[in-house]
Every structure is written in C-alpha cells, then in structure tokens.
Amino acid sequence: MLLIKTQRDMLLAPLQSVSGIVEKRHTLPILSNVLLDKKADKLTLLATDIEIQITTSTGGAAGDGDAAVTVGARKLQDILRSLPDMAEVSLNLEDKRLQLRAGKSRFTLQTLPAEDFPRMALSDGEIKKITVTQKQFRQLLGQTQFSMAAQDVRYYLNGLLLLVDENELRAVATDGHRLAYASMPLDGEATSPRQELILPRKTVLELGRLLADSDEPLQIELASNQIRFNFGHISLVSKLIDGKFPDYERVIPATLKNIVTLNRVALLQSMVRAAILTNEKFRGVRLVLTQGSMKIMAANAEQEEAQEEIEVDYNGDLIDVGFNVGYLLDVLNNSSVETVEWGFNDANSSALLTIPGNDRFKYVVMPMRI
C-alpha cells in the first residue's frame, strides 16, 4: 500500500527533529528505528531511547490509508538527505518492507512491527505547568549547560538542576570544578511549592538543538519523575535523574575582596592565544593581576611560553592564580555581553564571574595549582 506521498523536506524536517536521540547501536534493535504512524493526511513520527521520547507530526501526507510501521531512523534520514531538495518521495509498505521511491531512485528497507515499539508512559499524577518563550529557555540552558559533568560517577552531576521557586526559574550545572547558575522570572502569580528536578545531560543537549531562538511559546510540564516540553509540533518527554543535587548556594562566594571589570571579547581573545601553548592534558594558565594590569601566561613541557597582557582599571591586592583555561573559554564563548566582572578573594579561593548589573548569572571556577 502507498503509505505516504509528499515532498522530501516535508518528511526530512520532522525526521531530523526526532532522530537526534536515536542511538547507532542498541541492545534492542527496534530502538534504532523511528515509528511512522499515518492517520488520514497526518503523519506522526516518534523516537525513543527509553529515557527520552520525542514526538512530532506533519500534515500533507497523502496516501491510501492508515498504517503504522517502524524503520531504521538513521538510514531513512541519510537517504532523504541525499535526494534533491524538491524531490517528490513516496513510501510504500509491502510485505513487511518499506520501499522508498524518488524519481528513478529505489530503496527497500527492513521494518519492525509498530506494536512492538516501546512508548514511555506519561505521568498522570500532579503536574505543574509553566509557559516561557523558546528563546528564554534556550538562553537559560546556553548559560549553564557547558558546566555539566559528562561521565562522572556522581551521576546527579551528569545533568542540569532545574528549580522552580515562587515566580522564578533557575538552572544550575556543575562538574565539581566549576558551577554555572542562571535564572529568569516567571510571569503570573507565584507558583508553589518549590520544586527541584535534575534533567539528564542528553535531554539538555537535545533541547538546545531543537529549541528555536524565537518568542514562540514553550510549555513545560513538571511531574514527580518526568518532565515534558511542548513547543511547535514537537513534544519531548524525559525521565529525571533521581538524586540530590549539591547545595549550589554554598559554592557561590558571598563576599569578594578584589573585583576587576574586563571587556569580554578582549579577554576571550587573549585566553584563546595563550591556550595555544597549553598541554592537551594540562590546560592550565597562570593569571597575575596587579594594579592596572592583568597578565595571562601559559607554558608547556617543550618549555614554550605565551604571555598576554590586558590593561585594566584595578587597584586591589596582587593576585597570582592558576585556572583551567578550558573552563574560562567555555563561559566567555557562551556569553554575548560586552563586559564581565571577575571577583577574587585570594589565590586559593574560587573566583566568580558575573555580568555587571545582572544578578541572574553567576559562574564559579575553582583555581588549580600551576
């Protein structure tokens, strides 16, 4: 039977939205597939890795009747990508195989039954709903996600803390060496009680890929063990990390003796140049802050050295401290502000980077021995 006949992009765009979470190799072969469910002229696509589930739909899917089938997500996506932009594509379902036709091209793909495809059960308990813009939430993630741990044995660090407190939404991420905090106001009346959730790393990265930099609405539904994001034609459901996130408020320095204001781009460019001569395994740079001057120095095992100097308006204590330059580049690259404030107490204490006049962003970085 003719399942779908449509333009290439009408099929490729929604497929790309859901296939990002599909693993190349999986213990369950069907998890490498995407579910295609056609009803009338509406096609719904669904992908899952058991922890995350993404659903999207598209109209204009002409065909003979209603049917559902699963097929290899990456193969189907690669085939569609390789076809001409304006190609007309037809999918025919015959004898448990899916035949794709476009012009004089023919592809026959194996399928697995739709009824065997696992679907995440949606929480039906108490659900709290928040509505923000996609741009706002994307920015919140962008200011914090780079500080998440990747494969830490402290599994609760391999994700991002999302905290709803009265009329404020906060995001916090840390890998034990640095911490990023960002917050945004929520419109409307105060929402209570306070709720804390830890989003898995993969969920955060996928949202960063899918969310648009627009004022279109994003509805967030919070449950006890699950979170759901609805935006555009996409619905993303994710399990949560079950654990206790560290008390981030204790990590952020309450008082700072020495503060210097710097041009972000000038600081970034100096850090990038100094980082060229750092060792891949040892990414340390030495920072010396004196009256009117900040020096950034790097050296490696080949006895090569780099030194950058920035003129600054500073009259505080002499600071001679080392940092992982990668941690500094992360925060500077993921910001678009003109100036940053860098606060220190001494060479053995964590430093704090903030944005002048903005208390909604804080970045704490621990020093390292050079």
Image (spheres, rainbow, N blue to C red):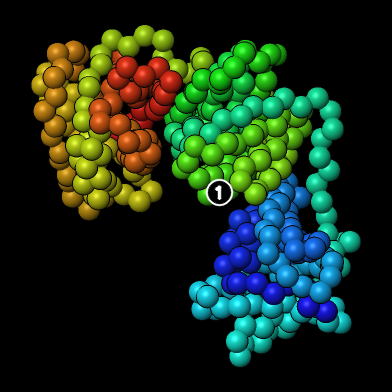
Nearest the viewer among 198 and 94 is 94
**Image quadrant where one finds the C terminus:** top left
Q: Position of residue 8 (x, y in %)?
A: 59, 72
Q: Nearer the viewer, residue 152 or 67?
A: 67
Residue 152 visible in the displayed image: no
Where on the picture, by quarter, is residue 108?
A: bottom right
Mark 1 neighbour density, 10 Å: few (under 14) some (14–19) many (20 or more): some
Q: Is residue 153 left or right of residue 64?
A: left
Foreground of the two, 127 or 330: 127
Which quarter of the figure is the N terminus placed in? bottom right
- Please provide percent x and percent y for residue 310: 14, 32
Amino acid on which disc 1 is placed: Leu
From the top left corner, tell me how far across and down residue 266 is, in percent. Answer: 19, 37
Q: In the image, what residue occupies the spot 74% across and 81% down?
A: 99
Identify the image quadrant of residue 366: top left
For the question of whether residue 168 can be seen, the reply is yes
The residue drawn where x is 56% and y is 21% is 186
Q: Which residue is mark 1?
A: 210
In the image, taking residue 209 as reference, residue 50 lies left or right, namely right
